[in-house]
Image (cartoon, grey):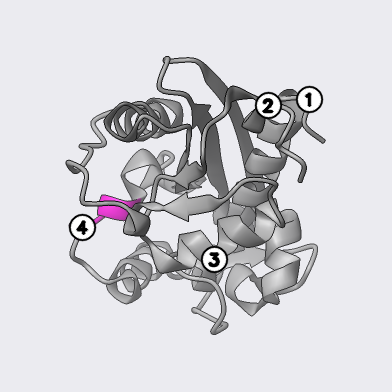
């Protein structure tokens, strides 16, 4: 992606990813591809105060992260918030996906809990979607926002060693695989996060 038109003209030395999650960093770097300015993460800076994700929507949480970090570092920041929504559970875990059953609870346990809740239900009752909201926030407060989703259903059992989080239980009928069974390249072409970031940069007029 060529983001030079929108970012480097503002004379910032780099663009910051608002995360230190190694899985997410790897994914976003692959989605963005080669950038004309350095792409850094929170690991490249002294610790910034943790951001409390108190928003009720993905957009609110993404903007909270992006705006607070952009202000603290005085640099443009890319942030995102995402979650898994399961229809039969009323859209849960939703914006609380990362904190479902507690922030320190492993995704293995989270996935097992969801599978237990949906055990015995027919496939048509297991509809679910991944949602991602991506934002670009400047220290001035200027923002750009894009959101995307991908539909599937909850699998009968976890499958796949790729991906992270809820990927092993998110089944994609069109592929006949869970998200965790897709190759790294496949996932970064079709995932909710890939679509959100691609849409974001399209709106910036930078593609």
Label 2 sits on residue: 6
Q: Which element is circle 3 on? A: helix
Q: As rendered, which of 34 and 37 lies closer to the eye?
A: 37
Name the magenta segment's main secondary structure. loop
Q: Height in image: 122 above or below 193?
A: below
- Segment tinted magenta in the rendering: 98-103
Identify the residue at image location x=33%, y=28%.
64
Q: Which element is circle 1 on? A: loop
Q: Residues within 10 Å of mark 4 (few under 14, many from 20)?
A: few
Identify the residue at image location x=40%, y=22%.
139
Q: As rendered, which of 119 and 38 lies closer to the eye?
A: 38
Q: Height in image: 174 above or below 36?
A: below
Label 3 sits on residue: 26
Labels 4 and 3: the sequence-earlier one: 3
Q: As rendered, which of 25 and 147 lies closer to the eye?
A: 25
Label 4 sits on residue: 103
Q: Height in image: 23 above or below 98?
A: below
Identify the residue at image location x=78%, y=25%.
205
Q: Height in image: 73 above or below 116?
A: above
Residue 99 is covered by the magenta coloring: yes
As measured in the structure, the alpha-carbon distance from the residue carrying label 3 to the one carrying label 2 is 23 Å
Kindly check if marks 4 and 2 are in contact, taking CB atoms under 8 A apart as contact: no
Q: Residues within 10 Å of mark 3 (few under 14, many from 20)?
A: few
Kindly check if marks 2 and 1 are in contact, taking CB atoms under 8 A apart as contact: yes
Labels 3 and 2: the sequence-earlier one: 2
Q: Picture coordinates of residue 100 (x, y %)?
A: 27, 54
As measured in the structure, the alpha-carbon distance from the residue carrying label 4 to the one carrying label 3 is 21 Å
Q: Quadrant of residue 200?
A: top right
């Amino acid at each position: 992606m060529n983001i030079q038109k929108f970012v480097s003209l503002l004379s910032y030395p780099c663009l910051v990813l608002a995360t230190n999650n190694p899985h997410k960093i790897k994914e976003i770097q692959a989605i963005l591809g080669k950038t004309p300015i350095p792409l850094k993460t929170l690991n490249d800076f002294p610790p910034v105060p943790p951001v409390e994700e108190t928003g009720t929507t993905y957009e609110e949480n993404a903007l909270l992260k992006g705006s607070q970090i952009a202000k603290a570092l005085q640099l443009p920041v890319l942030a995102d918030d995402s979650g898994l929504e399961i229809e039969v559970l009323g859209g849960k875990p939703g914006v609380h996906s990362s904190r479902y059953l507690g922030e320190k609870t492993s995704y293995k346990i989270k996935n097992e809990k969801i599978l237990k809740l949906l055990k015995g239900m027919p496939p048509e009752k297991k509809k679910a979607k991944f949602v991602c909201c991506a934002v670009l926030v400047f220290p001035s407060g200027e923002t750009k926002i894009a959101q995307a989703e991908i539909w599937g259903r909850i699998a009968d059992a976890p499958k796949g060693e790729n991906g992270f989080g809820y990927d092993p239980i998110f089944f994609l009928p069109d592929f006949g695989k869970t998200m965790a069974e897709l190759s790294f390249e496949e996932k970064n072409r079709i995932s909710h996060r890939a679509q959100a970031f691609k849409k974001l940069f399209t709106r910036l007029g930078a593609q």
